[in-house]
Image (cartoon, rainbow, N blue to C red):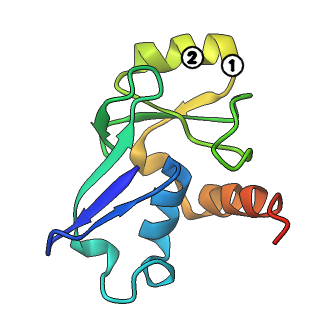
Amino acid sequence: AQLIVDDGRAHFFDSPVDLFLMLAEPARFDAQHRAEQAVALYVSDFRGGGWLDARRAVFVIGSRTRGPMRGPDLPAFADAASAEAFMAEQGGRALGFDDITPTLLSTLRDQNHARHTH
């Protein structure tokens, strides 16, 4: 995933989960910028690999697919049909950008960071 702020600086992330963590707690990642300064948010299409506008992507939560750190992830898709096909194979449920609530994000963060051993 990636986030671009209004001065052109870009942040790159291992997964959509990390992008949402940045938006929720920007000071942990970048002391100079606020979430409101984001002018572009992108996630990689899980099936096609191209960049998608994160605000328009369909995310899947609760699937059997693990993220880069082997924890829960939010695979992203360009449309509902692609997400549905993925869910038929891997389980989970579809969410839009605005459905990623602070509570949901907190659960994902805790599950992902509980796997770290350092």
Left or right: 65, with 36 as reference point: right
Give the Cα distance between marks 1 and 2.
6 Å
Q: As displayed, is residue 115 above or below residue 25?
A: above
Q: As displayed, is residue 75 above or below residue 21?
A: above
Q: Residues within 10 Å of mark 1 (few under 14, many from 20)?
A: some
Query: What residue is at 69 percent from the left and 19 percent from the top?
Result: 90
Closer to the camera in the image, 94 or 4 = 4
Closer to the camera in the image, 6 or 11 = 11
Q: As displayed, is residue 45 above or below residue 10?
A: above
Residue 54's label in the rendered image is: none
- Going by the numbered disc 1, the residue's amino acid type is Gln
Q: As displayed, is residue 24 above or below residue 94?
A: below
Q: Position of residue 55 (x, y in %)?
A: 31, 45
| Pointer 2 residue | 86
| Pointer 1 residue | 90
Query: What residue is at 75 percent from the left and 63 percent from the top?
Result: 113
Closer to the camera in the image, 56 or 32 = 32
**Tag 2's secondary structure?**
helix
- Going by the numbered disc 2, the residue's amino acid type is Phe
Query: What residue is at 49 percent from the left and 76 percent from the top?
Result: 25
Query: What residue is at 31 percent from the left and 60 percent from the top?
Result: 3
Question: Dividing the picture into quarters, in which one does residue 87 lie?
Answer: top right
- Residues at circles 1 and 2 in contact by the CB criterion of under 8 Å: yes
**Tag 1's secondary structure?**
helix
